[in-house]
């Protein structure tokens, strides 16, 4: 197995206070767990970045790259960037009765799985990806729903 890539977590929003250091540590564990999944494509880069942004910023990216209006929770780009809307994570955490940290961890794993070649466009693929996300979260964060 090749060496997993480095991952950095940067907070580019000012609306919600976050423990970025804890997310960075989680990101390292998540990269290792996702790198260990057999039979998938390799990560696209030796350097990955998680960028925590506002709804406004992610809505701009969503429109520009996906031609879809409005914010989304996470956007993953093939060169290794994972953009996460912290405001969307906060709303979804309340909706799904998760902590904000757990919701952000879920989005990091989700983005990493996309970078390994997993897709969630079809229902069966989405179920497989969701199951794998939960398994990874239980393993490295001790947080299952």
Image: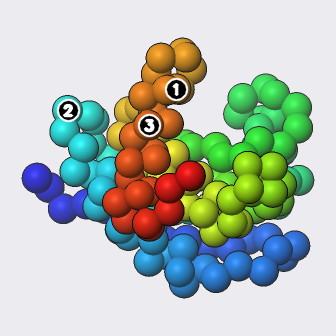
Q: Which mark is residue 39?
A: 2
Q: State the separation of the CA atoms marked 1 and 3.
A: 9 Å
Q: State the separation of the CA atoms marked 2 and 3.
A: 17 Å
Residue 108 as seen in the image, left or right of residue 65: left
- Residue 30 drawn at (x, y percent): 39, 61
Residue identifier under label 3: 131
Looking at this view, name the residue that lies furthest to the left: 1
- Which coloring applies here? rainbow
Residue 43 as seen in the image, left or right of residue 10: left
Q: Which residue is rendered at x = 44% and y = 77% of the image?
A: 25
Q: Secondary structure at mark 2?
A: loop
- Residue 31 drawn at (x, y percent): 35, 59
- Residue 32 drawn at (x, y percent): 29, 61
- Rendering quarter of residue 75: top right
The one nearer the camera, 21 or 115, is 21
How many marks can you see? 3
Q: Residues within 10 Å of mark 1 (few under 14, many from 20)?
A: some
Q: State the separation of the CA atoms marked 2 and 1.
A: 18 Å
The one nearer the camera, 132 or 48, is 132
- Residue 106 drawn at (x, y percent): 56, 54
Q: Residues within 10 Å of mark 3 (few under 14, many from 20)?
A: few
Residue identifier under label 1: 126
Q: Which residue is rendered at x = 53% and y = 80% of the image?
A: 22
Q: Which residue is rendered at x = 47% and y = 17% of the image?
A: 124
Q: Which residue is rendered at x = 55% and y = 17% of the image?
A: 123
In contact (CB < 8 Å): disc 1 and disc 3: no
Q: Secondary structure at mark 3?
A: helix
Q: Which mark is residue 80?
A: none
> Sequence-wise, which precedes: disc 2 or disc 1?
2
Image height of 134 relative to 41, above or below: below
Closer to the observer: label 2 or label 3?
A: 3
Residue 90 in sight here? yes
């Amino acid at each position: 197995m090749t060496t997993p890539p480095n991952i950095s977590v940067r907070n580019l929003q000012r609306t919600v206070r976050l423990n970025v250091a804890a997310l960075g540590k989680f990101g390292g564990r998540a990269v290792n767990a996702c790198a260990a999944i057999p039979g998938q494509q390799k990560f696209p880069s030796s350097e990955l970045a998680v960028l925590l942004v506002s709804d406004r910023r992610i809505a701009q990216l969503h429109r520009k790259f996906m031609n879809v209006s409005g914010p989304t929770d996470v956007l993953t780009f093939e060169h290794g960037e994972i953009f996460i809307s912290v405001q969307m994570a906060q709303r979804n955490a309340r909706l799904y009765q998760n902590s904000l940290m757990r919701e952000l961890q879920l989005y990091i794993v989700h983005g990493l799985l996309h970078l390994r070649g997993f897709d969630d466009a079809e229902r069966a693929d989405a179920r497989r990806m969701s199951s794998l996300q939960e398994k990874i979260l239980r393993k490295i964060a001790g947080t299952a729903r």
